[in-house]
Image (tube, grey):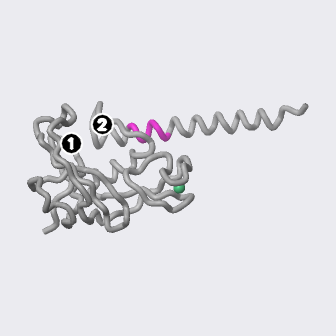
């Protein structure tokens, strides 16, 4: 049996591994310039999202296979399960509060800000997302209110939160 195709395949595989390692190093350097050493660590599916967020742009994910839009961006499409099929789409970040809850127990790094008002938002692009609402008190009047995503530096880190629309 001719083993040529298998050897070519191994070469192609090795090239691909080297390319991926180079991309990973490049991402790591970009990450370090923006976020410094240590946490946060981002997956391949969210790295670009966070880099753009640091530049002041908010994005949602769209599947290149089935066109489903979703948030947060991730490696596997939640609709058709295609892998590595996410592309980022600019979002206005405006929407309406679908639901909310008050979180008294939160991640240790955010405990000094507790309680947090966690909101579920229906973005105008038709995507539902989850984040926290700043500058408002929790009451039943929040449901249905217009809000917008706001990119802010909180406790020394760039984050996306929501604020009620003016
Ligand atoms: Zn899909």
* Label 2: how many Cα within 10 Å (few below 14, some 14–19, many 20+): few
Q: Position of residue 17 (x, y in %)?
A: 59, 35
Q: Secondary structure at mark 2?
A: loop
> Which range of residues does the magenta coloring cover?
23-28
**First of labels 1, 2 by sequence position:** 2
At a point 14% along the width and 53% down the height, the residue shown is 134
Q: Is residue 114 left or right of residue 124?
A: left
The residue under label 2 is 40
Q: Secondary structure at mark 1?
A: strand
Q: Position of residue 111 (x, y in %)?
A: 14, 35
Give the quarter of the figure containing the C terminus.
Answer: bottom left
Number of numbered callouts drawn:
2
Q: Position of residue 165 (x, y in %)?
A: 16, 66
At a point 47% along the width and 56% down the height, the residue shown is 87
At a point 24% along the width and 56% down the height, the residue shown is 99
The residue under label 1 is 157
Q: Up-down: is 2 above or below 148?
A: above
Give the quarter of the figure containing the N terminus.
Answer: top right
**In front of the other: 127 or 2:** 127
Q: Up-down: is 133 above or below 91?
A: above
**In front of the other: 123 or 47:** 123
Q: Position of residue 113 (x, y in %)?
A: 11, 40
Is the residue under label 2 in contact with that under label 1 (CB below 8 Å)? yes
Q: Is residue 133 left or right of residue 15?
A: left
Q: Per the image, is 76 magenta?
A: no
Q: Residue furthest front?
A: 140
Q: Is residue 69 left or right of residue 132?
A: right
At a point 50% along the width and 46% down the height, the residue shown is 76
Look at the magenta stretch and give its main secondary structure: helix
């Amino acid at each position: 049996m001719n083993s040529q195709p298998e050897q070519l395949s191994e070469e192609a595989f090795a090239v691909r591994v080297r390319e991926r390692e180079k991309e990973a190093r490049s991402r790591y350097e970009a990450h370090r310039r923006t976020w410094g050493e240590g946490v946060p660590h981002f997956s391949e599916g969210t790295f670009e999202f966070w880099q753009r967020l640091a530049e002041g742009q908010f994005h949602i994910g769209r599947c290149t296979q089935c066109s489903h839009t979703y948030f947060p961006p991730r490696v596997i499409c939640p609709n058709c399960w295609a892998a590595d099929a996410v592309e980022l789409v600019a979002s206005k970040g405006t929407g309406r509060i679908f639901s909310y809850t008050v979180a008294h127990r939160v991640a240790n790094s955010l405990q000094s800000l507790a309680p947090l008002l966690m909101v579920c938002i229906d973005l105008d692009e038709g995507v539902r997302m989850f984040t926290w609402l700043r500058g408002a008190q929790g009451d039943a009047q929040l449901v249905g209110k217009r809000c917008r995503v706001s990119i802010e530096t909180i406790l020394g880190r760039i984050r996306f939160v929501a604020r009620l629309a003016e």
